[in-house]
Image (cartoon, rainbow, N blue to C red):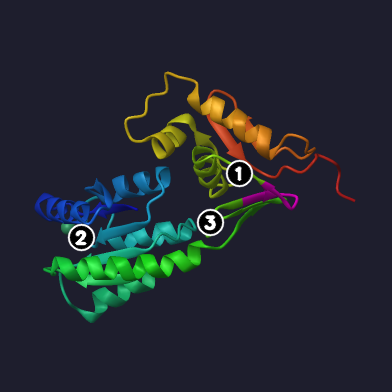
Amino acid sequence: MTILVVEDEVKITRFIKRGLEMEHYTVDVAYNGEDAIEKIELNSYDLIILDIMLPKKSGIDVVKQLRDDKIETPVIMLTAKDTIEDRVKGLDAGADDYLVKPFAFGELVARIRALLRREKTVKSTKLQIDDLILDPATHDVSRAGKELKLSSKEYRLLDYMMRRPGHVCTRTMIGEHIWGYNFTDDSNVIDVYISYLRRKVDKGFRNKLIHTVRDVGYKIQDKGLGLPKT
Ligand code: CA
């Protein structure tokens, strides 16, 4: 589980990060709204803790932009004042919950757990591209009704790409997500795994779903067979 903490007050950020790491969450940090958006677009977080008062872009604007971009990661807003107006603004913009500063750490953890539990039910929605189906609840993958046996890395790679249909997944994005933050692209390990996936997902099918984006990375997309529609 990876959580992004967005807050410009370094003391609070450090306190939350340390506490959450003790609860075995992986924690990433952003100190302003623009940085947050950039990180959210590049990584897939399970939850975001977002302060309202931020430099460059407010927490309200960040959550608005995420929801406009159809990014549905659960968001807990932090607000300095317990005014109804602030709460309503945050929830209206698309936040899932809010917490008034100063808060007890135990309460933050309880809210996180509740949101992640709820999210688990939502996330169990199957992903589908053409006749390729991935079920996050059971980890079953099938194409045209036939089960595909994937290794855990292959599964994570496919899951990552299927959550971004039609979007380029750069080698850096894939590397950092599957192999970790210190990934350096000086081996051809990603290309090797893509070739494994292609063998299982696309081999024998006329409609190829995994596409190479030259010099950049890969994407998964149902382009059809290029036949004119009748
Ligand atoms: Ca702040």
Dot 1: element: loop
- The residue sitting at the bottom extreme is 84
Dot 2: element: loop
Disc 2 under 8 Å from ligand 1? The reply is: yes
Residue at screen point 40% across, 45% down:
43
Contact check, label 2 and label 1, Cβ < 8 Å: no
Q: In the rendered image, which quarter is residue 167 located in?
A: top right
The label on residue 166 is: 1
Q: Is residue 58 above or below residue 81?
A: above
Residue at screen point 61% across, 31% down:
196
Q: In the rendered image, which quarter is residue 87 located in?
A: bottom left
The residue nearer to you, when weighing 77 against 85, is 77
Sequence-earlier tag: 2 or 1: 2
Query: Separation of disc 2 and disc 1 at Cα?
Result: 34 Å
Q: Would you say 80 lies left or right of 154 here?
A: left
Q: Amino acid at mark 3?
A: Pro
Q: Quadrant of ligand 1?
A: bottom left
Query: Separation of disc 3 and disc 1 at Cα?
Result: 19 Å
The residue nearer to you, when weighing 142 against 157, is 142
Residue at screen point 54% across, 23% down:
215
Dot 3: element: loop
The label on residue 53 is: 2
- Which span is picked out in magenta? 141-147
* Picture coordinates of residue 40, whole percent (x, y): 38, 49
Crowding at dot 1, Cα within 10 Å, few <14 / some 14-19 / many 20+, comes out as some
* Picture coordinates of residue 183, whole percent (x, y): 36, 29
Mark 3 sits on what residue?
Answer: 136
Q: Amino acid at mark 1?
A: Gly
